[in-house]
Each structure stands twice: as C-alpha cells, then as structure tokens.
Amino acid sequence: MNPSDFVMGISGDAGEGIVLTGELLTDVAARSNIHISSTQTFPAEVRGGQSYVQIRFGVDSVFNPGDRLDVLVAFNDLAYYRYKTNIASGDTILIIDGDPDSFDRATVLADWRGGPSYVIPMGKIAAEEIGEKRSKNMVALGAVTAHLGLRAELGEAVIRRFFGRKNPKLVDKNILAFQAGRAYVQQHVTKEDHLTVPHVRGDGYMVMSGNDAIALGALYAGCRFYGGYPITPASEIMQLLAEELPKVGGTMYQAEDEIASLAAVLGASFAGVRAMTATSGPGLSLMGELMGMSGIAEIPVVIVDVQRGGPSTGLPTKTEQSDLLPAMYGGHGEFPRVVMAPISIRDCFNVMRRAFEIAENYQVPVIVLSEQALGHRRATLPKSLLRETPQAEVARPLNEWGHTYNRFKITDSGISPRALCGDPGGTHMVTGLEHWDFGGPAHNPANRTEMVRKRFRKLRNLDRKYGGVFAFKGEDEAQHLHATTDEEAGRLSTVEASMRGQIGVIGWGSTAGVVREAVMRAEKRGISVGAIFPRMIYPHNDLTIRPFIEGHHRLLVVEENYMGQYARILLRYYDIDPYRLNKYDGLPFTPEMVLQKIEEVASHV
Amino acid sequence: MSSHELTREETPGNAGNQPADSAAGSVGAAHGTTGTNSSADAVTQPDRRTAADYKGRVAPIWCPGCGDYAVLSGLQKALANLDVDPDTLAVVSGIGCSSRMPGFIKCYGYHGAHGRALPAAIGLKCGNPRMTVVVVGGDGDGLSIGMGHLPHALRRNVDLTYLMLDNRIYGLTKGQTSPTTCQGLMTKTSPQGVLEMAMNPVRIAICFDASFVARAYSGQPKQLQAVIEAALRHKGFSLVQVLSPCVTFGKGSGFDYFGPRVKPLPDDHDASDMYAAMKASDECDDTIYTGIFYRHERPEYVEQIQARGGARGRELDAAQEPQIDVDALIERFS
C-alpha cells in the first residue's frame, strides 16, 4: 500500500449515486493537488444492475485507473462479492455499509481476505439522522474523505457546487449527510491502516473526462458549429458544447439523425465557420456517404467517433477500438481523409486543435477516434492547459475573388483557394458530382483523372508535418508531434532513443496509458521494451514507425478489437510477424494484462 | 420596413392567387438584416439587378420543354425584384433533375447528397445567417429519401425558401415511381400499377404547422414568380410545391393533364385557417388549387438561437470574435 499511488473501487446498485460519489471524490482530490485517473462502468440502462467507479490517486501523474484495488468501498453485499477478488494484497482496506437491510455483516467480515475492514452504517445514518435515504452516497463521501485525511471544507465546497447547480434546495441536506459520515468516522472508527493522502501544495487541478476535453479542444480550435445526434458514449461532447458554444457566438444543433448532423456540419462549414460532429460507431456508419461529400467537395469537417463495442448496436456503454478500418475506408469511392487517435485525456484536447487545423488547411474530413474508455474516464489536468493554450486564430478575411474565381483550381499542393459564403465575388458551386475547376459537373475522363490526383496530392507530406507519435521507454516519455520547431526536434532524439530494444510495443488510442505503465514495470524486471503510439494513424506515418519496427527484435501490437485492425495496416507496409494482444470483451486492458504479454514475448526472445 | 410589413401589403393569404403581376410592385429586401429598401427607393434605383444578373456558370441541361425552366426563370426574376445580392445568396439542393439548379444561378451553390438538402441548408443558415437561403429539390429527393428531414425543418421554422419541384416521377433515373406518382399509374418500377397512395407535400407541411405553404404551376409563370417572391419575403420556413411536369417520363402528369385542372385558390380562401388550407390542398379531384394555402407567423429558428447568443456567423472583423471566458471554464472543471 503506497499512499502516493493507490486504487479505490466504489460499488453499489445503479441508482445509488455511485458515479456521483466517485466524481465528487475525484474533485476533492484534485483540489487537494492529488492526481487522479478514474473510470466507471454502468449498465446500459440507467437503473438496475451494479454501478462501479474505480479511482487511482497519485502524487505524481497517473496514466490509467490501475488494476487491483487497495481500497474497496461496497454499498451492499452484491457489490462486495462482485469485487472482493480484485484486491491488490492482504492489506486492502474494506469500507462497507453497516445497514442490516443491505448487508449480512458477519458473513461478509468472515469472508474478507484483505486487510482492515470498517463498517459504517451509511444507509442508517442517511435515513435516521438526515431523514433522506438517498443521501447515503454523501454519507459515504464524508466517511471516505475523513478516513483518507482529505479536508472537510473541500468536500463541502464540491457538494455545494454540484447541488447548487442542480437544485439549491438539496445543498444543505447533502452537506449534513457528508458531515454525518465524517463525524461517524472521527467518533467511532479506530484507524488500523496507514493510508492517509499526503499533503501537496499547489492551486489544484481541473478534472475532466475525455469527452469534456474533446469539446474544449474544439472550442479552443475555433469550432463554432456543432451538429449532432445523441449517442452513447459521445453525448457529453454535445451537452458541454450546448452550454459553451452560445457563449462564443456558436451554435449547437441537435439534428434528427446522424446523416442530418453531418449534412448540417457541411452546410455550416461551407457557410464559413469551423464545424464538427461527434458520434459513435452506428453514427459513423450513417455518415459514410457524406464523408465522401466532404472529400469530393473539399469542405472541411471534423468527425469525432467515441468508439463503443460494435457492430450494430453492440455494447453501447463499453469500450472497443473497432472503428479504425471503417474510419479509414468507410464511405464509397476514394477521397483523401485524415484519421487521428488521441492517447490520453489531455491529448483529446490537443488532437482536436490539430484536427481542425488540418481539416481547414487541407480541406478534408478529419476523423478523430476516441473511445468509451477515454470519453468517460476522468483525469486531472493542470489549469495552465486552458490558461496558456492560445485560442486558434481562424483566418476569415472577406476576399475579393474577382470574375475568374475557380473554387477547385488545379494547384501543385492540391489545395485550392476557398471562398466562404458571403465573400464578394466568390460565388461558386460545390457538388458531390465530379466537377470542373470552376465547380460545374464534369464527366470528362481527363478532368476526372486530374481532379482525383489533385485531391489526393493534399495528403502528400502530411505525415511529415503532422505525423506525431508518442514513444515510451522506461520512465521516459517522448512526443514527436511534428519536428518543425527546435523544441520538437529535441524531443525527436528522445524518440529515437526508444526506437531500439528487444521488444517493441505498438498501439493506438487509449491503450497508451496502460502500455506505458506496463513498459515501466517490465523494465524494472529487466526486460528491454519500448512502445510507440502514432497520433495520426492515416495517412500512415512511415517516417517514425519504420525505424521503430526496424529497431526491435520482437513486435507486439496491442488493440482492443478482434481483427487486429491496426496490425493489419502495419502488415501492408512492413514484412513483419508481430505478436498480438487483443481484447474485445468491452472492458479496457489493465497494465497487468499487458505486462504479462510482454513477459511472455520476452520469454520467446 | 420589415419583411412582415411587406407581406402585409398583399391581400391576406392570396398574394399569388391571381395569375397577374399583383405582387411585383412590392419590392424589398428578402432578409431583414440588409433591408431598409422601400418600394419607392427600389423604383428610383438606377442600377437595379435584373434576372440576367443571376445567371450561373453552368447552362441548364434539362430536356426541351421541361417545367423546371419556368421555375429557374421565376426564381431569377423574383431575386431581381427583391434585389438580393448574389454574394449573399445560397442555393442548396440534393440530387435529381431539379437539384441541378444551383449551378444555373449566380450564387453560393451547394449541390449535395440525395435527400440531404434541408439539413445542409439549416447548417448553412446557422453558420452564416446573413445569407438568403433557397432550397431546391424534387419530389423524390424531398418526400422519399429526404422525408425524415422535412418535418424537422418545418417544426424548426428556419428562414429558408424550399422550392419542391414536383413532376410526380423519378426523371433523372428515367421513369420510376416517386412518392407523388398517382395511385394506379404504371411506371418502370410499377408495371402493374402503383399501389401506394400519392403523398401531398402541401398537406404534409400544413400538418406540421409550417409558417408558409404554397403551390404553383410551371405552366403559369407569372403566378409562380409571385408565389416565389412572397415565399422569399416570408420570415421563416416556406414550402412551395411547384407542379413542374416532366415532358419525357411524366406520363399522365404533363402540361395537358395539369392545364385544365390547375386553378387559383378562391378569393375568399383564408390562409390563416389551417383546416380550410387542408381541405383546399387536395390534388386528386378535377381541381388542383394553386396559391398560398397557409401562412402565419411564429418565431424563426436562427433568430431564437441568436437571441441566446449563438449563430453569430463569421465575424468580418477578427477583433469582434467573442473570446472564451477562460477563468469561468477553469472554475467549471476545478
């Protein structure tokens, strides 16, 4: 048990406020300058079944929500029996509800194989002292914060803020419940463990989910139109932008379906504002035809796909990385596009800024592949991220285009000057038909050939400029985003250092957090291992991936899908026979799973 | 002068019902943001635009005699009468013969995917509310593949003018059944006769409480132009069904069919009466009425977004761009 890095699981019936307890607890930690990474699982239905939140607390940055539990908080016996085997050691702390209605206390305590256990009558306190059974979760929050040594006023502040926004009448009762939980621990519980969160100085962190970070990244990128249709697990992006876009003159448009969503985004982008949509797999499928419209009519759009288990309706609330091939090849016909995948919550913010930049500069659709595991995970981020990141300067001069303006002029770069609706003299037609340089429909074979080539020329050298990777080796992390600045070039040398070794792990998206930790643990066990994660998956980033592949004796491709979609892409470029670690049960990898596989591969070297 | 005042100059409900130039005298801006024009000003303007100023870079490729020529001409004349600047005009369409229209008009033209013109037009209007937006499409584009979007466009009441050119057949694909093909008619995809009842777009629009619903006929170009003008002046969503015969594949629904049947709505038609409008909208009898069936005012969608801070569109001056309240965001997530 390490007070500087430990994992807590909180579980109970769906509808008992488990997720809220977890969220407020992470807020308290962030205000105490402690890093967190948290994840939640809940049934597809709002009520019924078990809810579960897992939070990892760290004095230093944490890259993932961890695997085994150092603390288990169980709201009832079902929750206890479900998670009791997932304990880290014989020291694991158990905090259980003492309500005889929900717990057979003696049986549970006799069954428990972990460390100190504490029985707190949370339900009873809520019902008898507060007169509101539903405030049990706030009693639990009070008990847990008191036990961990987190300050009362921080807990009260986050409760006040949460309920103040929701319904101010509920504030006082929930504060009382919180205080009652704390008081019970202080008066009746003798602490038998040494788990006290250390005091760290600072001005606190922000806590946000991957979906929040996507929305804020879009806002900072100058996005002023969002068209979308609600879908799990992407809706939070839409909900946040519904609040924030009007504050900067933008529009959140809830369309009647995903086709209309992307159609509206195309219309808004054609009109002259940066525009995006966000969806999940089923929506991406519906958007296929209009992605092609964006491609052939050269209208910039950003499409976020927060992937979930597929196909069809699949596993709506669970995670998967199975939309890579549809993102790269979905939609009929051939057109240039860019596919990016953020590797962390912070990266969600940064990737969105880059995605809008690419979409606008190259006039292509950019697809950003997030995942449920990223979208619903919460993590601490420094306040400087929002304070110091510049808001994108969107070029929007009203140009005088003159009489011979040709929207699709053939150029060496493939990029043609784009007039926006309202620009004097810029009138033109865009069409999903093949067209002449001025926009009129054309079936001419020579023109067709030239236009297809022009559009695909836009991708030339894109990997050189934007083909960022993240590379990990031991404790080191390197980012190679694009080597156009000295600072980036400096990082490049660190990337190169991680290009050689016995085992090279390749992955994409959210698995970076667990792979990074697995790589660190493996190195401590004497295994020579490095990892690389491309941020731009398509166009393929040969420049950086090739030396990594050539620099390792064994390769391991880690993916949360069955087919090994990224491994298949790699096989097209390289003569390799990689090991594979695939998972498609809807749950993310844990560091331990990846570590085991690395050890297995190492035993073959 | 507001666009509403302009429309009130006409006989309530019946502006376009007489096949005459009754509405041509009232000229004004089609959109309130640029419009301080009055009829008097417009008349004295020496450099008023003419229909020729709206000629696009693509020559129409419709069959000789196609009803759509009259719609193109009527739209161009209406735009000239309203003096709409081509730089602030967007024509949005889907796929079909009539959907080729954007290329024939000097404007910002968007010829998009089949059935998806309405949502694209709404996005466009939100993205740049200064634009006058005209949507053009056929009966298949609007009532079949795009039907999922129509009720939502109607209920939102976005300030768009939707010209649905209805030829009762799939013309571009050479003669298959469309949603408005008459029941019993034999087509390439219904060799034993159409089983389905034909759809009536005017009636559908009234059902969803559209704020402006009209019908016109390519064979009566003056009335057609007057109806389009009234629709352009209307603040809110206007749907104009134009009976526009296909001279190549539209058997049973040609000019010879419509000619004797099409009649202007009676003078005493009350365009504020939803039930009267419903009753008059019938297409199956010997009489097919044209004119403005239903018109009323209700809040426009984009203006409502603007009242809440959004839909500012592209700021012409970067300094005017609203800045993100960084401290508020940090506070929100702390």
Image (cartoon, rainbow, N blue to C red):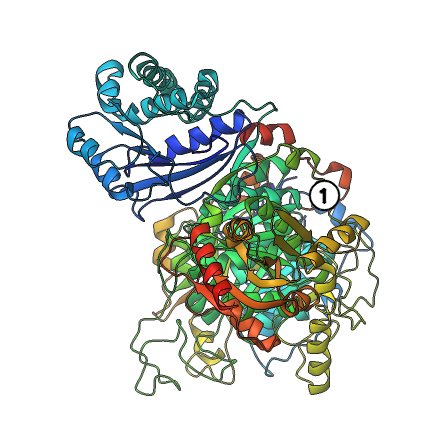
* Quadrant of the rendering where the N terminus of chain A is positioned: top left
Q: In this view, does A154 lie above or below A231?
A: above
Residue A495 point in image, percent of width and height: 69, 56
Q: Could you say whether the residue bearing mark 1 is in a helix, strand or loop?
A: loop
Q: How crowded is mark 1: few (under 14 residues within 10 Å), some or many (20 or more)?
A: some
Q: Which amino acid does label 1 sit on?
A: Glu
Q: Residue at x 64, y 31 (%)?
A: B326
Q: Is residue A1 above or below residue A286?
A: above
Q: In terms of depth relative to the viewer, which is nearer, A389 or A69? A: A69
Res A333 visible = yes
Q: In this view, does B153 lie above or below A196?
A: below
Q: In terms of depth relative to the viewer, which is nearer, A453 or B287? A: A453
Letter of the chain that mark 1 sits on in the rendering: B
Res B266 visible = no
User: What residue occupies the far top of the structure in this picture?
Assistant: A187
Would residue A146 be found to the left or right of residue B333 on screen? left
In this rendering, the count of numbered labels is: 1
- Which residue bears the numbered disc 1? B315
Q: Residue at x 49, y 58 (%)?
A: A260
Residue B127 point in image, percent of width and height: 62, 49
Q: Is residue B185 above or below residue A589?
A: below
Q: In terms of depth relative to the viewer, which is nearer, A386 or B216? A: A386
Q: Which residue is drawn at 79% across and 59% down?
A: A425
Residue A344 point in image, percent of width and height: 55, 48
* Quarter residue A457 falls in: bottom right
Would residue B283 be found to the left or right of residue A58 on screen? left
* Quarter residue B261 falls in: bottom left
Q: In terms of depth relative to the viewer, which is nearer, A40 or A211? A: A40
